[in-house]
């Protein structure tokens, strides 16, 4: 049990948010959002880790051997794949915004149009 | 809002956030009881040796169904947003010189990528099939399978990519995968009275045919992830290549 993964998670979250609010390009902004999201992975894995425990796969170790928490790993695993598709959706929105307005800077997209 | 004001606001919020989260995780206690319980029951109860797969597709199978539909909805959204509009026409890209062909990839790249396609497909199928035995499963194997078309594209074979993985086929694979998960769950409701309850023979732990309906769900998820990722690839490639390129 150490404080390091939690510190890394908080830092990743904040540095990602900083990137989002200072962003001048939609693609940059979307990548910053995935940095924010990766902080949740570090947090979850940090919670589930146990010193000296095996991976939760009982092929060559008997069931009941101390193993790390499989629940947080399962949460993370699905999220990694889902995040990529959500990123693709956001990038598609960026493509459309560029087609409509010719701009990719979120600061210059001040007008709402039907 | 001015950049300076925005940064000040962020600074205040960041310090507050760090203090609150820091004090929250300072006395965090992992739920050892639940983790140990899951690790103990998956082999005797379900004949699944990979506890992560057991959590994903059995113990918390309903959550994963929801996750999967987030993915389904995002891929659907991309397809909807980047569809070809009626007033758009194919034309040469503005940044390309007229009458000059794009140089084909070198022979080394072509041979390497084409040689990799077979092993990658085999490895993807292996990872999907052994999800309940070793680390892996539908999500991971599906992503591995989706790299095969990318390799074909890197070999400069965009036309064969469109022939091998046409859009209608990938759309059906994705829909079949998403619907298949729900159908496996519904059969559980009919035959075992609960949604996503196991209704297939459990087999023996460590075998490829073990884990009952979890193995079946693995395949549906693999189908959906592979189909969805390839569909995304095709849509974005069409956006950059075909729409602007008078092939």
Image (cartoon, coloured by chain):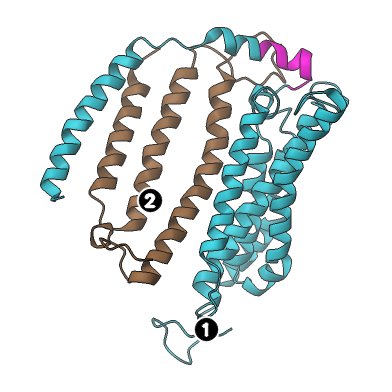
- The kind of secondary structure element at disc 2 is helix
Determine which residue is flagged by label 2. A30
The outermost residue toward the bottom is B99
* Residue B30 image point, x, y percent: 47, 12
Q: Residue at x 28, y 38 (%)?
A: A15
Is the N terminus of chain A in the top left, top right, bottom left or bottom right quadrant?
top left
Q: Residues within 10 Å of mark 1 (few under 14, many from 20)?
A: few
Disc ID at residue B89: 1
Supply the letter of whichever chain is brown. A
Q: Which image quarter: residue B189?
A: top right
- The kind of secondary structure element at disc 1 is loop
Q: Residues within 10 Å of mark 2 (few under 14, many from 20)?
A: many
Q: Which residues are magenta?
A: B39-48
Residue B180 in the image: above or below residue A113: above
Q: Is residue A20 magenta?
A: no
Residue B143 in the image: above or below residue B77: above
Is the C terminus of chain A in the top left, top right, bottom left or bottom right quadrant?
bottom left
| Prevailing secondary structure of the magenta residues | helix
* Residue B176 image point, x, y percent: 75, 50
On the question of residue A2 being in view, the answer is yes
Q: Which image quarter: residue B33?
A: top right
* Letter of the chain that mark 1 sits on in the rendering: B
The hue in which chain B appears in the rendered picture of the protein: cyan
């Amino acid at each position: 049990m150490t404080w390091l993964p939690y510190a890394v998670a908080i830092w990743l979250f904040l540095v990602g948010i900083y990137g989002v609010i200072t962003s001048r390009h939609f693609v940059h902004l979307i990548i910053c959002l995935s940095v924010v999201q990766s902080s949740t992975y570090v947090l979850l894995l940090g919670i589930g880790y146990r010193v000296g425990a095996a991976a939760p796969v009982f092929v060559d170790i008997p069931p009941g051997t101390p193993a790390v928490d499989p629940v947080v790993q399962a949460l993370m695993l699905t999220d990694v794949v889902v995040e990529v598709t959500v990123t693709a959706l956001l990038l598609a929105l960026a493509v459309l915004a560029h087609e409509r307005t010719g701009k990719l800077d979120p600061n210059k997209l001040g007008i709402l149009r039907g | 809002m001015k950049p300076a004001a925005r940064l000040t606001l962020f600074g205040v919020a960041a310090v507050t956030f760090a203090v609150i989260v820091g004090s929250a995780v300072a006395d965090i206690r992992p739920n050892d009881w639940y983790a140990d319980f899951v690790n103990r029951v998956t082999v005797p109860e379900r004949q699944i040796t990979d506890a992560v797969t057991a959590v994903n597709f059995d113990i918390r199978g309903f959550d994963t169904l929801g996750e999967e539909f987030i993915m389904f909805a995002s891929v659907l959204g991309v397809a909807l947003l980047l569809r070809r509009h009626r007033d758009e026409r194919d034309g040469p890209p503005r940044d390309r010189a007229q009458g000059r062909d794009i140089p084909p990839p070198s022979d080394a790249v072509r041979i390497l990528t084409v040689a990799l396609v077979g092993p990658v497909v085999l490895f993807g199928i292996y990872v999907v099939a052994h999800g309940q035995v070793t680390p892996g499963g539908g999500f991971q194997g599906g992503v591995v399978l989706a790299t095969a078309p990318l390799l074909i594209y890197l070999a400069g074979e965009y036309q064969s990519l469109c022939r091998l993985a046409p859009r209608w086929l990938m759309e059906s694979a994705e829909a079949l995968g998403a619907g298949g998960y729900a159908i496996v769950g519904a059969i559980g409701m009919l035959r075992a009275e609960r949604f996503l309850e196991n209704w297939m023979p459990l087999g023996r732990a460590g075998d490829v045919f073990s884990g009952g309906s979890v193995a079946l769900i693995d395949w549906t998820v693999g189908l959906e992830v592979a189909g969805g990722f390839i569909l995304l690839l095709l849509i974005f490639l069409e956006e950059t290549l075909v729409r602007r390129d008078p092939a």
